[in-house]
Amino acid sequence: MYIPHTEKDKEEMLKAIGAASFEDLVKQVPSGFLWPKFDLPQESLDESQAAARLAELSKKNCRPLNFVGAGAYERYTPAAVKAITSRTEFLTAYTPYQPEASQGTLQAIYEFQSTVCALYGMDCANASMYDGASSFAEAVRATVRVTGRRKIVYSAGVHPQYMDTLKTYFAHSPDYTYVKVPMKDGVMDREALPALLEGAACLAVQTPNFLGLIEDMDGVSALVKKAGALLVAASDPVSLGVLKTPGEYGADFAVGEGQSLGLPLAYGGPYLGLFSCKKEHVRQMPGRFVLTLQAREQHIRRDKAASNICSNEALCALAATVYAALLGPEGMRELAEANMGAAAHAAERLAGIKGCSLKFKGPFFNEFVLSVPGSAAAMREKALGQGVDIGLPLAPLYPELGETLLVCATEARTEADIARLEKAVREAI
């Protein structure tokens, strides 16, 4: 490793900053994230030796047959996606600042925005965000600016990590309140809404929700508008091949995670935030989009900006655009149907195992909650030893659900895969 700074350079930089030492500079970071340092080899390696070392380490990786979803999904990506995204006119993964040298990227961003609007049934979309969680947080933040209210009502079915991200946005102020709409049979309790929405900036809902269940959104927008609030809807874009779009049921902001559109799981990223809204809220839109619509404060007067995010995930957005264009509307519908079919087949097989049952009776998309006998975490650990990840134990996130697994089956899972899942669950029990 080559580090250009001498000890004298470091001392001068620390003096200019006003820190006595590097440790003093990073003292706000919890020590667990700093020490001990990485256990890296002390000997120096040339390129071929380093490649051999990494190849040896890679053999430790385990890739089980995967039935975990929870917001990130294993899907098949057509070979054409990588071929097109590798072309030189799309070479940059970052925001294009020189239009004359970035025509391919600018065209792709336009197509991406058009694709997101079509998927979500909304008027306007930006050029992407970091991930679904940041899109969700920015949408809720926009409703606070529009309404002037600081009460945030959200469904208990919203992804827990989305809510964690949202709360970091408002962590500087104690004035914000978060009100959870309780669940009833795994979905939002509609009867509780009128009272909870009083004085709220928004209602934030996810459908299909974190448990895989499809929320009934008919009439929800009317309840929200009656309370003077706005509706934020988060949706898996693949599900919109068969479900009503947020635009159809009256959402003001529609967001989602774009990883499902041709992006690999990749150990957690980079992913792709989808963000869209109605035309009347276009000035509240964060990040990059057509600059004729964007306020200059986004770049030069950041204290007055709607958002301090002024970048985008251009290469990920390109992959999603190519993926959606390859499938087209009919292909998206067929993909969504294949997901529903795989999940329904897996649910039927697992519910037939003695001691197992579906926790909820409502319609679901590509994942469902399975009640299991004994410890779900112990079952998962045992099945991993056989090369199958049978699902996500829900007790740490939803203790009230008891010993349950969130099981996902996408179009990438074959009938043979599902038979292997059933066998793994039986043996784990």
Image: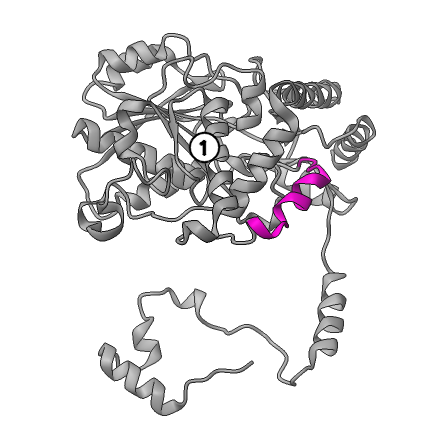
Name the quarter where the N terminus is drawn. Answer: bottom right
Answer left or right for 51 relative to 215.
right
Which residue is identified by label 1? 113
Answer left or right for 234 relative to 375.
left
User: What secondary structure is the stretch in magenta mostly built from?
Assistant: helix
**In the image, what residue occupies the spot 72% across and 41% down?**
79
**In the image, what residue occupies the spot 35% across and 87% down?**
9
- Span highlighted in magenta in the image: 75-89
**In the image, what residue occupies the spot 68% across and 82% down?**
45
Total numbered badges shown on the rendered structure: 1
Is residue 395 inside the magenta stretch? no
Residue that lies at the very extreme toward the front in this rendered image: 100
Say above or below: 197 vs 172: above
The quadrant in which residue 147 appears is: top left
Q: Where is residue 395 in the image (x, y as percent from the top left)?
A: 53, 35
Camera-side residue of 160 and 302? 302
Say above or below: 427 vs 362: below
The quadrant in which residue 76 appears is: top right
Answer left or right for 51 relative to 260.
right
Is residue 81 inside the magenta stretch? yes
Residue 393 appears in view: no
Say above or below: 192 vs 58: above
Answer left or right for 338 relative to 362.
right
